Image (tube, rainbow, N blue to C red):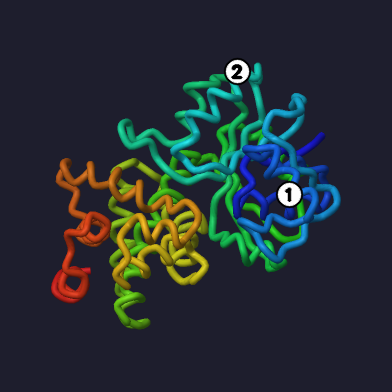
Amino acid sequence: MKVYVLGAGNWGTTLATVFAEKNQIVLWTNTTEEAEQINKDRENKQFLPGIMLPDNISAEKKYNSRLNSDDILIVSVPSRKVHEICEEIKAQGYTQPIYVNVSKGVEHKSLKTIHEIVKDFIPKVHFANLSGPTIAREIAEGLPAKAVLASDDIELLFYLQKELANSRLFFEFSTDVKGIELAASLKGLIAIAIGIADGLGYKTNIFGLLMTKGLSEFYKLMKFFNVNPKTVYGIAGMGDLITTCLSENSRNRQFGKLLAQGLDVDSALQKVGMEVEGVSMAKTVMKLTRLNISLPLISFVVDTINGEAELRKDLEEVLLKMPV
């Protein structure tokens, strides 16, 4: 049995180092040149600089070798690329892969989660989702964390528990796949708001208000999608939201701070240098305001991304003059 990690970004490379503790890892890259660089340097200098990779991690261009039925495929790509990846997996002839999703996002048009998208393409897929308060850099540097593995296939959860066991990343288990996915997708919006406040010079008093207001809107959205309250207030919900808001390594928080410092969206994204899922998610969630769901804080984030907000005035309006 091998573990394949499709996507050699920050999070994919970190998970490769974690699961290399007891497994042979194949890190699938987009290009042969990228794989050769990682193998030569024993380091992913672009996305995880300073972390040396164990000897049992080998990088290769994606699909260069064949998956066996008991191999685990961990997919770590931006959510907008999931359709493309599913088409590729299907074209490779994999009809029942063990697919562990670690991407975050929801399809804009249909509001489908990644689980639903993958099932559309590969109906017999063995699917699980991994999510939680997991800042990649902290884990890559050896600090412990806990995440949630979610699947409606109990046998698969037992298999993943056994094969992915390690001393750094611990797991809780859930059958609420959609709830876990939605929680992962939505929390970045609140982290962007925290970043905006940080960039404007606000401190912990406002951060506390933002997280309280953010959790209120977070719960409102999750309730609309009939998500179990236990998921909302668990480590993949509130736990991940708080971690993403507090961490200065959070891409969403970094992005919000750069906006507040005067950068436009494209410049801020370029400076972050990695995918910021909260940007696309903000636009998706705003479709729900047409259903009379009041989301003033998330609306403020969207207006900021669109260049339509008076940052300090509008943020204080949402936090100080409206009920939390």
Point out the residue furthest to the front here.
33
Residue 144: x and y in percent read 68, 65
Say which quadrant the N terminus sits in. top right
Q: Position of residue 101 (x, y in %)?
A: 57, 40
Q: Image point 76% across, 40% down: which residue?
A: 26
**Secondary structure at numbered mark 2:** helix
Q: In this figure, which residue is indicated by the disc labeled 1?
A: 37
Q: Nearer the viewer, residue 188 or 264?
A: 264
Q: Please, is residue 21 above or below residue 114 in the view? A: below
Name which residue type carries label 2. Ala
Residue 271, position in %: x, y?
A: 45, 62
Mark 2–mark 1 distance (CA, rounded to whole Å): 27 Å
Q: Residue at x 50, y 39 (%)?
A: 177
Which circle, 2 or 1, is nearer the viewer?
1
Residue 75, quarter of picture: top right
Image side of residue 115 versus residue 26, left or right: left
Residue named by callout 2: 91
Residue at 60% in and 60% down? 136
